[in-house]
Image (tube, rainbow, N blue to C red):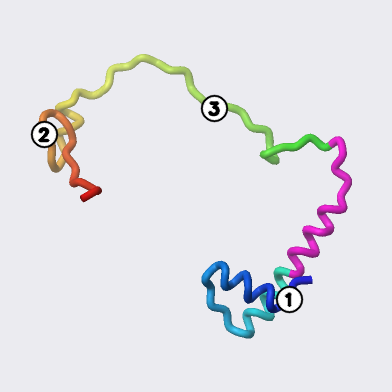
């Protein structure tokens, strides 16, 4: 079972300030979570294939198709600032 002292320790690690009333609530909630995890650990899982997804996954990639793209002039038409055929943006590192 988790204690109030454990909750205070976890809060300190997470840099959280918790009042006394919330400490009681979190002690009960974390205790219930740990009890549930204990129940799950008692389940028979031998022969159960490990999975990362609960539903079947499939690729939805489309086939590549060669197509013409817009011209550089059209791409830069609404650019607020451009130079030598390229977008110009403010520096982000000083």
Q: Is residue 86 left or right of residue 47?
A: left
The magenta span reads: 31-47
> In this orientation, which residue lies closer to the viewer: 45 or 15?
15
Q: Which residue is mark 1?
A: 3
- The question of residue 78 being in magenta is answered with no
Percent x, y of residue 18: 57, 79
Image quadrant where residue 13 sits: bottom right
- Let me know if residue 42 is in the magenta part: yes
Tell me if label 1 and label 2 are in contact, CB under 8 Å: no
Determine which residue is flagged by label 2: 83
Secondary structure beneath label 1 = loop
Question: Quick check: 35 above or below 40?
Answer: below
Write down the quadrant of residue 59 in the picture. top right
Front position among marks 1 and 2:
1
**Gap in Å between the C-alphas at discs 1 and 2?**
64 Å
State the quadrant of the N terminus.
Answer: bottom right
Between marks 3 and 2 in the image, the one whose residue lies nearer the viewer: 2
Q: Nearer the viewer, residue 36 or 1?
A: 1
Q: For numbered disc 2, what is the local secondary structure?
A: strand
Alpha carbon separation for disc pair 3 and 2: 38 Å
Q: Residue at x 75, y 37 (%)?
A: 50
Q: Quadrant of residue 47?
A: top right
Q: Which mark is residue 60?
A: 3
The residue located at (19%, 23%) in the rendering is 71
Please say if 20 is above or below 7.
below
Tell me which residue sits at (40%, 16%) in the image: 65
How far, Cα to Cα, is label 1 from label 3?
A: 48 Å
Label 1 or label 3, whichever lies nearer to me, is 1
């Amino acid at each position: 079972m988790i204690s109030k002292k454990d909750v205070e320790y976890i809060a300190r690690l997470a840099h959280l300030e918790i009042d006394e009333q919330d400490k009681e609530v979190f002690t009960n909630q974390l205790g219930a979570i740990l009890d549930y995890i204990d129940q799950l650990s008692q389940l028979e899982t031998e022969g159960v294939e490990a999975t990362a997804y609960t539903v079947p996954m499939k690729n939805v990639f489309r086939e590549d198709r060669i197509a013409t793209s817009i011209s550089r002039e059209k791409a830069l038409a609404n650019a607020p600032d451009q130079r030598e055929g390229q977008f110009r943006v403010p520096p982000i590192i000083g």
